[in-house]
Amino acid sequence: MAAILARKLGMTQRFNQDDGRVERVTVLEAGPCHVTAIRTADRDGYDAVQLGFGATRERRLTRPELGHLKKAGAPPLRHLAEFRDEAGELSIGDQVTVEAFEPGQVVKVSGVSKGKGFQGTIKRHNFSRGPASHGSHNVRPPGSVGASATPSRVHQGVKGPGRMGGKRVTQLGLEVVEVIARDNLLLVRGSVPGPRGTTVEVRSDG
């Protein structure tokens, strides 16, 4: 299968041995992940595989979680995630490693983006600013957002200031640059969602 859970370690750069071109890559500590459950269409209504990642202490998990992992023969794990249509020939108790990927493979990475707090429309929605000269007071406000008499309200869905980031984001079309199996590392060209240390989901793209 081409799906795995990983921890974002940060970004670095490497030089392509073929043409000497510098490549900006994100280093992911991918797996090994334990297969903790298999979902089937006959029993569950859909086909999927559940992977566990990130060793933790028993006291940090509930008894149902510990019982579920013990039934699968897995140690206490912090993160569980399901990947649809990726079960293949896996069975409960197997392990998924970075060897499931290969250089040149195109993947998509899902994670929670960095939270940026309450932001205005210029930063949040890329609005243009107003003139800053000739006594203008409309420098960073969003401007007019609704009529006065009719409908006497602001329509739902109008872009405005608010909480930015902290949402699930999927980055598509990322290329695997290198697979370091001995260290469980996956080098992906470009950036992936979230700050350092967060857990992301990596799966084949298409």
Image (cartoon, grey):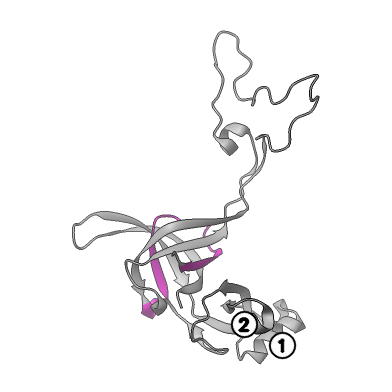
Residue beneath the point at 79% across and 25% down:
151
Q: CA distance from mark 1 to mark 2?
A: 21 Å
Picture coordinates of residue 194 (x, y %)?
54, 56
Q: Which mark is residue 40?
A: 2
Picture coordinates of residue 96 (x, y %)?
48, 81
Residue tagged by mark 1? 67
- Alpha-carbon neighbours of circle 2 within 10 Å: few (<14), some, or many (≥20)? some
Task: Describe the element under mark 1 as helix, strand or loop.
Answer: helix
Picture coordinates of residue 33 (x, y %)?
52, 80
Residue beneath the point at 50% across and 70% down:
6
Task: Describe the element under mark 2 as helix, strand or loop.
Answer: loop
| Residue 194 visible somewhere in the drawing | no
Residue beneath the point at 56% across and 8% down:
134
The magenta stretch spans residue 4:
no
Q: How many numbered callouts?
A: 2
Q: Which residues are magenta?
A: 181-203
| Closest to the observer, 51 or 14 | 51
* Residue at the front extreme, as displayed: 42
Give the residue type that dot 2 points to.
Answer: Thr
